[in-house]
């Protein structure tokens, strides 16, 4: 793959890869994992054309290359945040979900991914992803003490 083709590849793949890894690890860690995955992609660019689902493959590369330094998903909220636009307890509630529930909920409801897309990323069936989303939303509602219509 020539440098121009690789540039086009990165432009097509990077946003989805970054969102998935940020949903898994949080903003800073997700960007680092994305950079690790894209560095691997550059080093192995001759193999990229063989991949049927490069985002899912690079997602796993990013996870494995950053595994020894895993941290919590989301940072603690800042002491004073003058532009708070989400429920203040949401970060803590998201931390309480299992990793698969958190990734499924954030990608489906936060980024608008389909169940099939998340399933391809996590190597799960769409129905399994749907179960993770439903269970994650139920746990969020209970923890935040809100109903379906709130």
Image (cartoon, grey):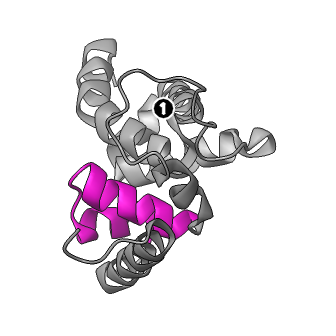
* Residue 12 falls in image quadrant: top left
Height in image: 147 above or below 110? below
Q: Looking at the image, how many numbered discs can be counted on the residues? A: 1
Please name whichever residue, 89 or 130, is drawn nearer the observer in this view of the structure: 89
Height in image: 131 above or below 15? below
Q: Could one spot residue 52 in this view of the protein?
A: no
Residue 61 on image: x %, y %: 57, 45
Q: Residue at x 45, y 48 (%)?
A: 23
Left/right placement of residue 87 relative to residue 41 reads left
Q: Dominant secondary structure of the magenta stretch?
A: helix
Looking at the figure, which quarter contains the C terminus? Answer: bottom left
Q: Residue at x 53, y 40 (%)?
A: 26
Magenta segment includes 81:
no
Height in image: 46 above or below 17? above
Q: Could one spot residue 138 in this view of the protein?
A: yes
Q: Residue at x 60, y 47 (%)?
A: 73
Residue 119 on image: x %, y %: 35, 70
Residue 43 on image: x %, y %: 55, 25
* Residue 18 falls in image quadrant: top left
Please name whichever residue, 66 or 84, is drawn nearer the observer in this view of the structure: 84
Residue 133 on image: x %, y %: 37, 74
Residue span colored magenta = 99-123
Q: Secondary structure at mark 1?
A: helix
Which residue of the protein is positioned furthest toward the top in this rendering? 3
* Residue 15 falls in image quadrant: top left
Q: Which residue is mark 1?
A: 41
Q: Residue at x 35, y 80 (%)?
A: 134
């Amino acid at each position: 793959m020539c440098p121009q083709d690789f540039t086009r590849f990165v432009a097509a793949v990077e946003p989805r890869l970054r969102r998935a890894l940020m949903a898994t690890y949080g903003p800073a860690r997700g960007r680092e994992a994305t950079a690790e995955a894209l560095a691997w992609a550059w080093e192995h660019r001759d193999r990229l054309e063989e991949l049927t689902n490069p985002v899912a493959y690079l997602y796993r590369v990013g996870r494995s290359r950053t595994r020894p330094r895993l941290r919590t998903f989301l940072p603690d909220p800042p002491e004073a945040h003058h532009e708070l636009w989400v429920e203040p307890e949401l970060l803590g509630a998201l931390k309480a979900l299992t990793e698969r529930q958190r990734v499924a909920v954030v990608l489906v409801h936060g980024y608008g991914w389909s169940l099939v897309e998340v399933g391809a990323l996590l190597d799960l069936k769409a129905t399994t992803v749907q179960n993770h989303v439903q269970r994650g939303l139920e746990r969020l509602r209970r923890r935040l003490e809100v109903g379906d219509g709130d």
